[in-house]
Image (cartoon, rainbow, N blue to C red):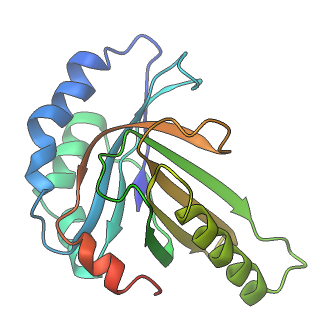
């Protein structure tokens, strides 16, 4: 699940967003049903055309997502920024990388449309193999693969220990990671 809050070009990311994550990010460090939340930002002019707060969640149980969306945590976002569109996908895989114990500093999100002529099962199997190869790359903390069958789009999401260089996709700075049930994601890595 991910929502993106795009902010004005002159928005004070330091005072508002960075401070918000620094003071509130730990509140989900023990949230039931949350496998992993990466608090992500992009800043205009730093490899991004926009200022954006765009946290990404990997839920270990749908009840956790429901509890969050209908509870006080998400209501705080709505109260402060308005109600964003919440994107959600069906999880296909979660894999730890060689840097699994390191703090994540960069996240890369890559969206790949599934061609109209492609067999869905074959496209998913090829994406799973790509995720396995990516997960073995030096510097990878973790990678996840999901699919949106409404739009027929695959989502590759990778946390990196450092800036990954030429990895294609949208780049985000990771401000904090809450991962109370990350072990459940590993155990249930193929949904």
Find the residue positioned furthest to the top: 10
Residue 49 picture quarter = top right
Q: Say which of 43 and 167 sits in front.
A: 167
Q: Is residue 40 above or below residue 183?
A: above
Please report the residue visible at 82 percent of the width from the left and 86 percent of the height from the top.
119
Q: How many marks?
A: 0
Relative image position of residue 69 (x, y in whole percent)? 24, 63
Q: Is residue 49 left or right of residue 34?
A: right
Relative image position of residue 175 (x, y in whole percent)? 29, 36
Relative image position of residue 92 (x, y in whole percent)? 52, 79
Please report the residue visible at 53 percent of the width from the left and 25 percent of the height from the top.
50
Q: Say which of 142 and 154 sits in front.
A: 142
Residue 18 picture quarter = top left
Find the residue positioned furthest to the right: 117
Q: Say which of 43 and 63 sits in front.
A: 43
Relative image position of residue 91 (x, y in whole percent)? 48, 77
Q: Is residue 5 left or right of residue 20?
A: right
């Amino acid at each position: 699940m991910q929502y993106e809050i795009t902010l004005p070009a002159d928005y004070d990311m330091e005072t508002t967003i960075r401070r918000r994550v620094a003071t509130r990010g730990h509140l989900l460090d023990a949230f039931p049903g949350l496998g992993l939340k990466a608090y992500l930002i992009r800043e205009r002019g730093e490899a991004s055309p926009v200022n954006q707060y765009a946290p990404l969640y990997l839920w270990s149980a749908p009840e956790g997502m429901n509890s969050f969306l209908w509870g006080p945590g998400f209501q705080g976002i709505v109260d402060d920024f308005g109600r964003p569109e919440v994107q959600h996908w069906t999880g296909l895989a979660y894999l730890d990388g060689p840097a699994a114990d390191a703090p994540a500093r960069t996240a890369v999100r890559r969206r790949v449309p599934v061609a109209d002529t492609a067999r869905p099962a074959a496209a998913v199997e090829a994406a799973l193999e790509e995720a396995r190869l990516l997960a073995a790359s030096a510097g990878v903390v973790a990678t996840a693969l999901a699919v949106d069958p409404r739009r027929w789009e695959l989502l590759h999401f990778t946390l990196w220990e450092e800036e990954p260089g030429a990895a294609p996709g949208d780049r985000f700075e990771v401000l904090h990671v809450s991962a109370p049930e990350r072990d459940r994601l590993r155990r249930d890595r193929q949904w």
